């Protein structure tokens, strides 16, 4: 009797675990996916748990739909989403957010690629390492992945039909911080050279920063992050955030003023409402129209060709 009870308890525990731990996200078949580090990521621990979708039924819905929370990423990758129609030659490297704990891989990743592809832009989706891989300099790992990703895109630009002088970055929340970090930390790699891709510049040609975190220090009266210091070489930047964002709108305003002081072309959009973590999912709030503003800006800075009259 005791053995039967133990067996039933073990089966019940196994069933609960299977519901809690969903299979990890995988890119659609047919797309090119490269490991960022062909011989393993620098400083990677020997034993890491498998990737997993940590989403639960209690997680907040965005525009009425759930999102994927991809966790335990120890093998970072770059997946190429080419445009299905006209190709403008523009490539954008996308960094999903997730507080450097998980990656919102659909809301701030694959859905972004769908939009960029419809605009004629090649989307380069980065599955960077999490958890506890940032913000820099607390950990170098995510910024190492970002530097490596931009260099790899330049290395493969011809193969992927991308203009090597029109490679930008776009990030959300922690990924927005990562976009700002690679925009200000491109002169020196944070890792030993791996191959010829690391001989190429990892400076983005432009950056889109969406509801960023870690750029202003709330515990220090929103003083700018001393590890994010724009210079005149920082690329043109588009920033968007909502005033009621619980991650604090000062992350956007402080970074914008830093860019202005460094004479970097920058555009700032602040909306009254929107909160945090809405991605591209449309609601009745004006903040969710930000992708159209980005498209106009890309024409303005001559990344996208001039619109027909």
Image: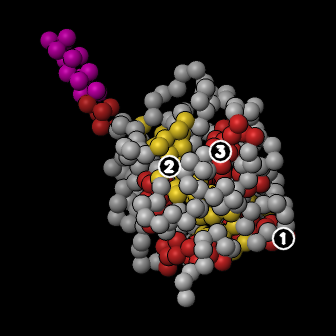
As drawn, the label of residue 179 is none
Task: Tell me the CA gap for discs 1 and 3.
Answer: 29 Å
Q: Is residue 43 among the parts visible in the rendering?
A: yes
Disc 1 or 3, which lies upstream in sequence? 3
- Does residue 201 appear left or right of residue 300 in this picture? right
Q: Quadrant of residue 229?
A: bottom right
Q: Residue at x 75, y 40 (%)?
A: 199
**Residue 91 colored in magenta in the image:** no
Rendered position, 269 above or below 198: below
Residue range of the region highlighted in magenta in the rendering: 1-14
Residue picked out by circle 1? 263
Count every numbered label the image shows and give the total.
Answer: 3
Q: Earlier in the sequence, mark 2 or mark 3?
A: 2
The one nearer the camera, 9 or 128, is 128
Q: What secondary structure characterizes most of the magenta part? A: helix
Give the x, y percent position of residue 6: 23, 16
Quarter of the picture holding the C terminus: bottom right
In the picture, the disc for residue 80 is: 2
* Secondary element type, mark 3: helix
Which residue is at 41% across, 74% downward? 283
* Image position, residue 15 (x, y; %): 26, 31
Res. 114 image quadrant: bottom left
Which residue in the protein does label 3 denote? 155
**10 Å neighbourhood of mark 3: few (<14), some, or many (≥20)?**
some
Q: Which is in the foreground here, disc 2 or disc 3?
A: 3
First-in-chain label (2 vs 1): 2
Quadrant that contains the N terminus:
top left
């Amino acid at each position: 009797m005791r053995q039967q009870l133990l067996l039933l308890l073990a089966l019940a525990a196994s069933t609960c675990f299977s519901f809690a731990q969903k299979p990890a996200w995988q890119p659609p078949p047919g797309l090119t996916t490269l490991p960022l580090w062909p011989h393993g990521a620098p400083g990677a621990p020997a034993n890491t748990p498998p990737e997993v979708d940590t989403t639960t039924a209690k997680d907040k819905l965005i525009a009425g739909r759930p999102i994927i929370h991809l966790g335990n990423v120890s093998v970072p990758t770059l997946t190429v989403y080419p445009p299905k129609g006209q190709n403008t030659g523009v490539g954008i490297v996308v960094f999903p957010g997730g507080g450097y704990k998980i990656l919102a891989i659909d809301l701030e990743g694959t859905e972004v690629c769908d939009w960029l592809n419809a605009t004629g832009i090649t989307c380069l989706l980065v599955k960077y390492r999490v958890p506890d891989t940032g913000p820099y300099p607390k950990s170098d790992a995510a910024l190492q992945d970002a530097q490596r990703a931009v260099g790899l895109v330049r290395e493969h630009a011809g193969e992927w039909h991308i203009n090597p002088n029109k490679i930008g970055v776009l990030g959300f929340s922690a990924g927005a911080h990562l976009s700002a970090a690679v925009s200000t930390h491109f002169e020196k790699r944070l890792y030993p050279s791996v191959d010829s891709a690391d001989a190429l510049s990892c400076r983005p040609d432009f950056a889109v920063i969406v509801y960023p975190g870690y750029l202003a220090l709330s515990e220090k009266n929103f003083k700018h992050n001393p590890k994010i210091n724009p210079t005149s070489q920082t690329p043109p930047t588009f920033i968007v955030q909502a005033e009621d964002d619980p991650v604090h709108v000062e992350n956007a305003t402080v970074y914008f003023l830093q860019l202005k002081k460094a004479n970097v072309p920058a555009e700032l959009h602040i909306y009254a409402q929107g909160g945090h973590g809405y991605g591209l999912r449309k609601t009745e709030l004006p903040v969710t129209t930000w992708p159209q503003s980005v498209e106009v800006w890309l024409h303005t800075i001559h990344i996208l060709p001039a619109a027909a009259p």
